[in-house]
Amino acid sequence: MINTILFDLDGTIMDTNELIISTFLHILNHPDADPLTREHIIPHMGGTLDDQLRTFSGLKDVSELVKGYRAYNLLHHDQMVKPFPYVIEVIQELRARGIKLGVVTTKIRPSTIRVLDLFDLTSSMDYIVTVDDVEHPKPHAEPVLKALAGLNAKAEHTLMVGDSSFDILSAQAAGVKSAGVAWSLKGEETLRGYGPDYILHDMRDLLKLEFQGVDVS
């Protein structure tokens, strides 16, 4: 029975999709390069920024691209992000039921806190793991294991919710249950291919699961 839920951030509880895609297109598309498209970007979303930029640019040193990405992203951030439907209501209900909540993300900590603060969600999370906090980011088990340790949670009672293979594989490597979100840009069938325990078609589907030994569906 579940008493702890870990959330990925981008594409899972926060709709940052268009911000991310537009930022990549802005910094990487120039006249001398092959055009980068949404179709190139979407399969790689969920990985670290450095890894994505290396893939898209073919460069080993992407430090300047990272600076450009962060500057553009920050400039447009607050106008282009919003929670997915029912996220805030469901998080409030889960807290009311005594469920421990956390975030496990490949974002850096300042960006993570910024978007959570924007919608008054930082205080709703009992523990936050960012890419700054681990040596091996998702899909490695380390981020999820770090969250379990920080929450004093047991793997068999924990669910990781995400929109990409990185989330599902990290959950599986750490021995926790996983849920893929059907609103992922990667598509429900793509996520099903990684074998998550659940597919959520609406964030309210979380409230139908069994918590702390009580079936609340």
Image: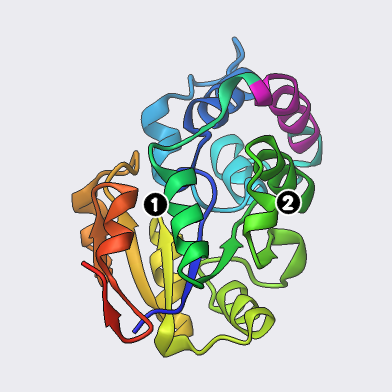
The disc at residue 163 is 1
The quarter of the picture where residue 32 lies is top right
Question: Residue 131, how many percent across, how many down?
Answer: 69, 60
- Residue type highlighted by circle 2: Ile
**Left or right: where does residue 53 sit relative to residue 182?**
right
Q: Residue at x 29, y 81 (%)?
A: 214
**Left or right: where does residue 64 sit relative to residue 122?**
right
Whether residue 73 is in magenta: the answer is yes
Question: Residue 49, how many percent across, how many down?
Answer: 64, 46
Q: Between residues 6 and 72, which one lies in front from this camera angle?
A: 6
Q: Residue at x 68, y 63 (%)?
A: 128
Question: Residue 167, how many percent across, how many down?
Answer: 45, 63
The disc at residue 108 is 2
Residue 44 visible in this rendered orientation of the protein:
no
- Residue type highlighted by circle 1: Asp
Q: Residue at x 23, y 48 (%)?
A: 201
Q: Dot 1 surroundings within 10 Å: few (below 14), some, or many (20 or more)?
A: many
Q: Quadrant of the N terminus?
A: bottom left
- Residue extent of the magenta highlight: 66-78
Q: Quadrant of the C terminus?
A: bottom left
Residue 14 visible in this rendered orientation of the protein:
yes
**Left or right: where does residue 165 sit relative to residue 121?**
left
Which color mode does the image show? Answer: rainbow
**Is residue 215 positioned above or below 106 on the image?**
below
Whether residue 89 is in magenta: the answer is no
**Is residue 141 positioned above or below 37 on the image?**
below
